[in-house]
Image (cartoon, rainbow, N blue to C red):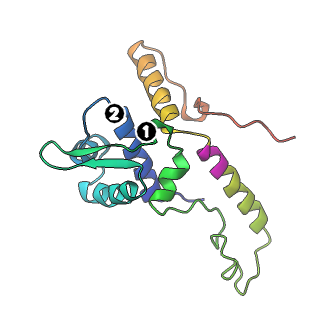
Amino acid sequence: MKLTTKGRYAVTAMLDLALHEDEEVVTLADISRRQQISVAYLEQLFGRLRRQGLVASVRGPGGGYRLGEAGMAIPITSIIQAVNEPISTTQCGGDPVHCCKGEGQQCLTHDLWEALGQEITRFLDGITLAQLVLEHRRKEQQQAAGIVPLRSNEARLPQRPAHG
């Protein structure tokens, strides 16, 4: 699976917005500065996020964005899907007409990659902005206390039980 810049930036920008929800509104310029994402790109993403109701815009002087009605309960999959980013791990994208080998024929490992994509979707669907905010704040507290942060492969996001 390759999650493109669009999906990664949308999640990053939404997390930034959630981390600053105590502010009246957050401008795209602020997110751009903090996350090093161009304002023009953020405008495209936030247009899509707004149309899906994940963010609300405030017009006029001092305007910007805030989280939509779902607030921090937004699952990560909703963010990725709102910007038209498919969560697919198959080469064909799951299109039965244009399968891996063409003419409706699947490659030998199609089912394997399809199952992986379903697991990734389930994982991301089980994580909300609220969980990411809590994890980020926990790391900040650890760093402020001089505690060495966990390596990225030891992240404390929800763990899925092993099949069996």
Quick one: SS at disc 2?
loop
The image quadrant of residue 33 is top left
In this view, which residue lies farthest toward the bottom?
103
The image quadrant of residue 62 is top left
Q: Which residue was labeled with disc 2?
A: 21
Which percent across, then down, holds residue 133? Answer: 45, 31
Residue 19 bears which disc, if any?
Answer: none
Quick one: SS at disc 1?
helix
* Magenta region includes residue 78: no
Q: Which stretch is magenta?
A: 121-125
Which of discs 2 and 1 lies nearer the camera? The answer is 1
The image quadrant of residue 30 is top left
Closest to the observer, 55 or 124? 55
Relative to 49, residue 164 above or below:
above
Q: Residue at x 42, y 13 (%)?
A: 146
Q: In terms of secondary structure, what is the magenta stretch mainly?
A: helix
On-image quarter of the C terminus: top right
Gap in angstroms between the C-alphas marked 2 and 1: 9 Å
| Residue type marked 2 | Glu
Relative to 141, residue 157 above or below:
below
Label 1 crowd (10 A; few <14 / some 14-19 / many >=20): some
Which percent across, then down, holds residue 23? Answer: 26, 31
In this view, which residue lies farthest toward the front?
69
Relative to 122, residue 117 above or below:
below
Which percent across, then down, holds residue 100? Answer: 69, 77
| Residue type marked 1 | Gly
In the image, is 18 to the left or to the right of 33? right
Q: Which residue was labeled with disc 1?
A: 71
Q: How many callouts does the rendering have?
A: 2
* Magenta region includes residue 123: yes
